[in-house]
Image: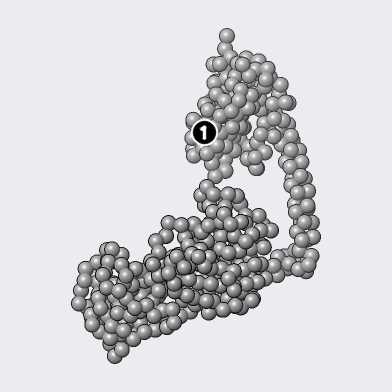
Amino acid sequence: MAQSIRLESEVTFSGYTDAESRTTVVGLFKDGAEVDALETGVEGVVVLEETPFYAEAGGQIGDQGLIRAVDGASCFTVDDTTRGGEQHLHHGKVLEGTLHRGEVVVAAIDQERRRDIVLNHSATHLLHAALRDVLGTHVEQKGSLVAADRLRFDFSHPKPVAADEIRRIAEIVNRRIRDNTETLVEVMDFDQAIAKGAMALFGEKYADRVRVLTMGNGFSVELCGGTHVGRTGDIGAFHIVSEEGIAAGVRRVEALTGRHALDWFLDGEQEIDTVASIVRGRRGELGDKTTQLADRMRTLQREVHALNSKLAADRGADLASGAVDVNGIRVLTAIVDGDPKSMKTTMDSLRDRLGDSIVVLGHVGDKVSLVVGVSRSVAERVNAGEAVRFVGAQVGARGGGRAEMAQAGGGDRPDKLNEALDSVVDWVRERTAG
């Protein structure tokens, strides 16, 4: 596979300063095998002598863009860029013409996408420092994703980050953005970088010479080979959208920057306006309005519950006349309509009304539901759990319960419900004979 390609040659990476480079194709690969040319429609990997395309590393995703022959005869679209040894592998497909090894081309990245990635990557550095500032120096980076539309940052922390801590972290990052300080990039010996206070990722391998990125006048100092903003103000805005645990002692923050953060805010503003319109109030009244609506909803729920209880009792009075005496036990079976959740209330009402009794109720909705109630006085002779399993087996419902009450659901044979309920009388008679 193309991802397994490893080359001894080194590429000249111009992407820290340039969005495009005039360069030469030094290698072409199809299905992992080196070829002399790639034709129209063929997917493959292009290796260049020099490239502005950043290869995925350190959480930053690889660049996309175009590689076009200087004479315009061929064009290769780059969908991803990865590393192969010290080379950058440009994965994609030939859009037109035939791309040849040795051909002189212009390699140009998707600048808007790169710009979004740069904002997110620089923001992760400020976020890391802010997390340590608010939560403590025990915080260490455990992973990251720097994409075009969002950033994701994993870090060590033993408990969920509180809402007020999230707010303070975001405020610190945005304050550093507003300060608009210059980003300082230095290349130095690894030991010198550590002495300078640069953060190094645990378990990461570093060369003798490393790239040190300083942001916020020393607020953040880290080893990093990624692409970054010239000034913190370029990030524009930063917003944390979620925080969650992903493993024992590891938390994850997802956030947005730049235009994506602005879109989030604008969508939120539109949502607030929509809610305000629905509740017929102004923005400043939304808290009171929603509290009033929640209180009203709870009141209505209580009223509905009371009405359902009354309805169940009234329904019970009508159904009770259908009970059959079996060896001194009133046996009542029925199919009930309405809300299946009210079946238990109906069953309780019927059982109380009938005295020594067994009540078996069925409901047909998406599936068959059953509830069985047995009076305490006869529970030793007729068991509700056994009864619900007996009826449930006939309609495909599963469940169980205690001697006096049992339930079952998920029945997939509603056409058998009438027959199953009719069989209860004989079932009770067999268990109470003698």
Query: For this view, does 3 lie left or right of residue 262?
Result: left
Q: Residue at x 61, y 22 (%)?
A: 403
Residue 258 appears in the picture as rendered? no
In the picture, residue 238 is in which quadrant? bottom right
From what the image shows, is residue 10 above or below residue 58?
below
Number of other residues with Cα within 10 Å of mark 1, as a class: few under 14, some 14 to 19, many 20 or more: some
If the image is split into quadrants, where does the N terminus sit?
bottom left
Q: Residue at x 37, y 77 (%)?
A: 13
Instruction: Work out which residue is located at the far bottom of the displayed protein and give it.
Output: 71
Q: Residue at x 64, y 76 (%)?
A: 178
If the image is split into quadrants, where does the C terminus sit?
top right
From what the image shows, is residue 95 above or below residue 83?
below
In the picture, residue 2 is in which quadrant? bottom left
- Residue 151's x, y, as percent? 52, 66
Q: Residue at x 55, y 37 (%)?
A: 409
Out of 235 and 325, give the one closest to the viewer. Answer: 235
Residue 322 appears in the picture as rendered? yes
From what the image shows, is residue 205 above or below residue 354?
below
Query: For this view, does 16 lie left or right of residue 25?
Result: right
Question: As shown in the figure, which amino acid type bears the numbered disc 1?
Answer: Arg
Out of 46 and 165, give the one closest to the viewer. Answer: 165
Query: For this view, does 349 lie left or right of residue 372?
Result: right
Instruction: Work out which residue is located at the far top of the displayed protein and give it.
Output: 434
- Residue 152's x, y, as percent? 52, 62
Out of 140 and 326, give the one closest to the viewer. Answer: 140
In the picture, residue 381 is in which quadrant? top right
- Residue 336's x, y, as percent? 63, 37
Helix, strand or loop status at disc 1: strand
Residue that carries the numbered disc 1 in the rendered image: 398
For the image, the number of numbered tags is 1
From what the image shows, is residue 365 above or below residue 348?
below
- Residue 185's x, y, as percent? 49, 76
